[in-house]
Amino acid sequence: MEKELLLMLPGPVPMPERVRYAMMRQAINHRSAEFGAVYADCVRVLRTAFGTTNDLFVISGSGTAGMEAAVANVGKEKEIACLVNGKFGERLYKISQRYGKAHEIASEWGTPLNLAALEERLEQGAEVVTLVHNETSAGIRNPAQEVGRLARNHDALFIMDGITSIGGDLVEADAWGVDIAITGSQKCLAAPAGLAMVSVSNRAWERLTKNPPYYLDLAAYKKSAAGKPMETPYTPAVPLFLALREACLLIEEEGLAARIARHRKMSQAVQAAAKAWGLSLFPKIDAKHGYSATVTAVEYPTGVKDDEVRAFIKKMGIVIAGGQDHLKGKIFRIGNMGAVSAPEILATLAATQVALKKYGYKLQGDGVQAAGEVLG
Amino acid sequence: MEKELLLMLPGPVPMPERVRYAMMRQAINHRSAEFGAVYADCVRVLRTAFGTTNDLFVISGSGTAGMEAAVANVGKEKEIACLVNGKFGERLYKISQRYGKAHEIASEWGTPLNLAALEERLEQGAEVVTLVHNETSAGIRNPAQEVGRLARNHDALFIMDGITSIGGDLVEADAWGVDIAITGSQKCLAAPAGLAMVSVSNRAWERLTKNPPYYLDLAAYKKSAAGKPMETPYTPAVPLFLALREACLLIEEEGLAARIARHRKMSQAVQAAAKAWGLSLFPKIDAKHGYSATVTAVEYPTGVKDDEVRAFIKKMGIVIAGGQDHLKGKIFRIGNMGAVSAPEILATLAATQVALKKYGYKLQGDGVQAAGEVLG
């Protein structure tokens, strides 16, 4: 088989061998002590990555299924305040529209959230707040702790999408007052795509709304997880659970703090390269918002064509992301989620540097050198 | 690693090596021509197994997610007639209750459906009918063609759960008038658990109801599948798609007709063994209903304890199923879905025969011999 492309995307990301090989096992019964132990291993490690002691479940479905599980179980017919400064904030808003009275609190993609407008909406009676912690469409880290404080002050539930932060950046769901936190398997956990994880606080359990989708009914997950052996209510995607368990054990072996420090260092290296090239990072941050520690969004210089640059990089075996929706052609994005370390970052930045130069940009300086100094 | 248990369950089932090994690949981009080709291969083969030329989608989620997708997209606020003669019929009824006005048309588990009551309900205006084609909880095959005819006569939509028949027994979704057919990956397709497939007729598209769950919105699947490359609306469980593709190619290589004939022969061998032992098959069939071709449910003789029998068989490395819910302890079930052929059937029947004898049942005859004569 030909060598796989190196995916430097904001997910999916390269998986360690142990994670991949765990999937090739013969089928096992998902109503068995053995499967229950796999599930329990995942939950133990994920609780540390979420920063929570709450109930935590793994749903066989993509991150979007996890987002919907959150909204559908506590948001039905509720006033929902949806903070939006990127594509995934928009998705949470769209999902919220299916269940409750959703109010979009929109900022331009990649600009700070309007927390004053959130406070106003909370004063007007919003009962649920939705936030994307790390907005990969724009490369911005949103102030989850601050949003949690506002939600708690007004006794609203706080749903936080941590799909691209949990396991790669610091998340303290309990300390921040997050009632339902969500992540996905194919991002910072470096597991295969197809699983969503949600944690659920006691406050959220007390405020469950009626009649969520059958498949996403969190009460059913709770009941099955409490059994001996620990189970899921419907047949789980067993190979993905086996892979997730290995991914979780790898997190435990590396240590969560070291893993977060690694992610931060990798993103700082990319940021340093962009700066050295003379390019602007896309997000407009303030004291409360930060650059994402798991994906870096960089503005293209005028005249340089996205499709040419990324096609050239891809010819060298590396895939970086362009912009989504209205940002198509305007930015490129380099992910550093999961198992990524210096070799992948250096290769990616070198390829990008060559491509930028080749397609007409006059580099201000050597981004690879700048990155290497951060990494070394 | 210790040898895996041989799972002779009505799912999950043993997977061929090619299917398992397909999963260990490094992550690939799901928004790529390569992934689109994988998805297209699956759809091409699945259409033959469904007996349909309709749109067909693969959802990352278990069979239950597929059942819910069917009901949620056409059943909202509708009158739904739910045929129930086993556990999965009950599940479709429970799901239907979340969306529309669901009417249960119940028979004892494993006894013929009440088609006269269905007709009455259709005359009273039922707009949707739900049926489980092959009810594994009871080992009975329900008359899908007949139900389809009744539904069509009254212009109702017909949702058919083919989770444990499609790919193992004859299904002709189009000829039978099925509007939405559903299957799951870990049954007769012999792929890993975690994917659901649904086919959708033009009549169903014309009658979509509003506001299904976001994750299960079939219109979104249609839009993404029509793209170039073919895509899913949300991140798919890529390793499971890779495995499903191999499983589908294996079906193509074996030939669907040969595969169905193999399943029928394997189930006939189990039926012959039960008969030789002097045990009754659990289902009470009539001219319209049949014994399942993918799982055989057998009544325990009086005094023989389910837990002893199955524990002994498991000690020999084989797992068969007991009864579910109120049938616990009363029946045992032997699955023959997917890649199962004579060696697995003979081993299972031999182990069962030994166990029955050991735990007090006086066998009338040699079931292994009877089965071997069917298989040879």
Image (cartoon, coloured by chain):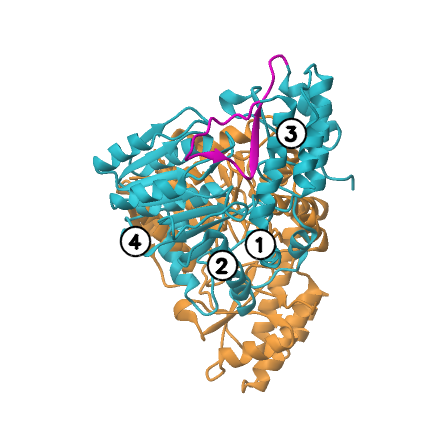
Chain colours: A cyan, B orange
Identify the disc placed on residue A203: 4
Q: Amino acid at mark 3?
A: Ala
Same chain for mark 4 and mark 3? The answer is: yes
Instruction: Point out the frontmost of discs 3 and 2.
Output: 3
- Where residue A209 appears, x then y in whole percent? 28, 48
In primary-sequence order, the first of circles 1 and 2 is: 2
Q: Amino acid at mark 4?
A: Arg
Q: Residue furthest top?
A: A303
Q: Amino acid at mark 1?
A: Leu
Q: In the rendered view, does A7 fall on the left or right side of B80?
A: right
Is residue A155 inside the magenta stretch? no
Location of mark 1 (residue): A244
Q: From which residue to which does the magenta span run?
A: A280-303
Residue located 71% across and 48% down the image: B254
- Where residue B188 appears, x then y in whole percent? 59, 53
CA separation, marks 4 and 1? 28 Å
- Where residue B262 appears, x then y in whole percent? 66, 56
Same chain for mark 2 and mark 4? The answer is: yes
Q: Secondary structure at mark 2?
A: helix
Q: Secondary structure at mark 3?
A: helix
Same chain for mark 4 and mark 1? The answer is: yes
Magenta stretch, overall SS: loop
